[in-house]
Image (tube, grey):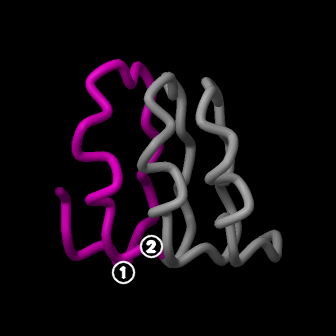
Amino acid sequence: MNSITDISPLAELTKMTHLRLYDNQIKDISAIVDMDDLILLWIHNNQIEDISALRNKDGMLQLGLKAMQLLTSMC
């Protein structure tokens, strides 16, 4: 397990295409809401409860969500 808890500094990187944040302690992924070019997101094994930030990610090709025990809202 890694120790990243806050990804808000990534919000400025709106052209990001690949993001691997698995095995951390992240709770909030709202920072990715404006990453319209995101095609790969691995966020499995985190403390995320709400993935509504993924709602309009129509171009997403890979999404890793396994081991998300706290996930309550799918979008």
Q: Earlier in the sequence, mark 2 or mark 1?
A: 2
Residue 32 falls left or right of residue 12: left
Q: Residues within 10 Å of mark 2 (few under 14, many from 20)?
A: many
Question: Is 19 on the left-hand or right-hand side of 51?
Answer: right
Dividing the picture into quarters, in which one does residue 48 lie? bottom left
Q: Is residue 38 above or below residue 51?
A: above
For disc 2, the marked residue is 48
Inter-mark Cα distance, 2 to 1 = 6 Å
The disc labelled 2 sits on which kind of residue? Ile
Q: Is residue 33 a member of the stretch shown in magenta?
A: no
Q: Which residue is mark 1?
A: 70
| In this rendering, the label closer to the viewer, 2 or 1 | 2
Residue at 41% in and 67% down: 68
On residue 27, which mark appears?
none
For residue 9, what is the image quadrant? bottom right
**Left or right of residue 56, residue 70 in this image:** right
The amino acid marked with disc number 1 is Leu
Contact between marks 2 and 1 (CB within 8 A): the answer is yes
Q: Position of residue 45 (x, y in %)?
A: 56, 64
**Left or right of 37, for residue 6:** right
Q: What quarter of the picture does the C terminus occupy?
A: bottom left
Secondary structure beneath dot 1 equals: loop
Percent position (x, y) of residue 17? 61, 24
The residue lying at 22 percent from left, 76 percent from top is 72
The stretch of residues the image draws in magenta is 48-75
**Overall secondary structure of the magenta section:** loop
* Residue 35: percent from left, percent from top: 50, 37
Q: Residue at x 31, y 70 (%)?
A: 50
Of residue 4 and residue 45, the one placed in the foreground of this image is: 4
